Image (tube, grey):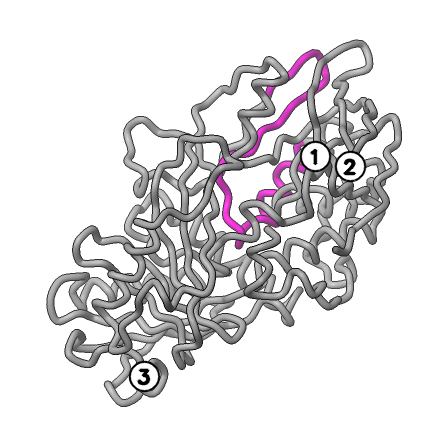
Amino acid sequence: MDTLSSTKLEPRYRVVILGGGIHGVGIAHDLASRGWRDVLVVEKSIVGSGTSAKSTKLIHGGLRYLQHPRDFPLVAEGLEERALLVKLAPDIVKPLPFIFPVLKKGGMPRFMVKIGLWLYDALSMGRSLGRHAWLNPEQAFEEAPILDKAVFKGFYRFFDGQTDDLELTRRVAKSAKKLGATIAEHSEALSMTHGDNGWTITVRQGERTSTITTKYVVNALGPWAHEFMARANIKPKVAGINNQGTHIIVRDLGLKSGLFLQSPEDSRIFFVLPWKGYTLIGTTEDNFDGPADNCRPEDHQVQYLLERCNRFLAAKLSKDDVIQSFSGMRWLAGDPKSGLSDTSRSHLITQHATGHDVLYTIYGGKLTAYRALSKEVADLIAKSFGDKSKSLTHLKEMWAEPESMPAELVVPQRFNVL
């Protein structure tokens, strides 16, 4: 396994970030791009091994979020970040055409699909990856020969982005390291207290335990955030929801485009995507109330995905076709007035201040817009120090050069490691 840094820790840092997911390393990258060197990321496993490696692998605005006007700004932000990431990391963030079929029975009517795609194009004006278009059946089946011709009455095509989420997260971490941040993998934050020197954090690295102090802590642990806060005797300011999403990987089904599909029974959107020589199918949405380390794909979730796919595909799939399955958790701020599917994906940053020392905790956020969230947190921290420097993560020279992924993290066996 490759490591991103040596694990020797200094006794004090200006900022300590807990969690080496996309937001944790993104904040370190942002601060390092401003010239900050005394920034530490503490990750108990390897960078990107948690939620950030278990997404649907999309860099997108979130077409389905247009069902809620409150989320229009979230979509616009995602589309802006999508265009930027395609330029910054073109080897791992690439445009992908999608087919949005119109069903003969159930699903969204054609006029609603048309309005949604028109709005999606409008919000991406000036940074579009391609405008939507109506396809004839021959065009659609050339792109997706596995579609069941008897189910659909028409097809739209639109464009979004696709990535390797783990590779992107590790690229960002290596970029932060290149600029002077410290990335400590296989290092677990056990406890945290507050005293005259600010926050004191006990970190375990193998059989060695060390103590570090800092003024600012960023809790970017996602589904593990409240577990750490409980050990630190800090009461969260909002409830957290673990929204479990399960995906399956099957053989290459011959797709040249991704499929954007909607289940008629429960209106859930799911994707069937070509990815790294395989087909990726997901995702489910379920509340997960257990310890975050225990999150695993459930049989009923795998079966749900297979059944929904088989309603639309001529090539019927069974459990024997599943090469790998994996589950990730979207860590959201709870809203007692909303169901799981309706809970906003907009992020929330809470603050616990003790004197001039601050703990920030991150809820929500999307892989696509990680850079914008990271800038927001880094702006808050820099401002408190009177530092007027600007984020420079939008510049290509602030990024590390591409590197090959280690053999143990190649798909599909990577999910046995993670």
Q: Is residue 154 left or right of residue 296?
A: left
Residue 145 image label = 3
Residue at image point 78% right, 51% down: 3
Spot occupied by residue 203 in the image (x, y as percentages of width and height): 76, 28
Distance CA(mark 3)–CA(mark 2) = 49 Å
User: Mark 2: which secondary structure?
Assistant: strand
Which residue occupies the extreme left position in the image? 105
User: Mark 1: which secondary structure?
Assistant: strand
Spot occupied by residue 408 in the image (x, y as percentages of width and height): 67, 61
Mark found first going from the N terminus, 3 or 2: 2
Distance CA(mark 3)–CA(mark 1) = 46 Å
Mark found first going from the N terminus, 3 or 1: 1
Q: Is residue 377 magenta?
A: yes
Using a 10 Å C-alpha cutoff, classify the residue at mark 2 as few (fewer than 14 neighbours), some (14 to 19) or many (20 or more). many
What's drawn in magenta, residue-wise?
352-380
Distance CA(mark 2)–CA(mark 1) = 6 Å
Above or below residue 382? Residue 215 is: above
Q: Nearer the viewer, residue 289 or 233?
A: 289
Residue at image point 34% right, 70% down: 259
Residue type highlighted by circle 2 = Leu
Residue 17 image label = 1
Q: Is residue 82 left or right of residue 192?
A: left
Give the labeled residue for mark 2.
Answer: 40
Q: Is residue 114 magenta?
A: no
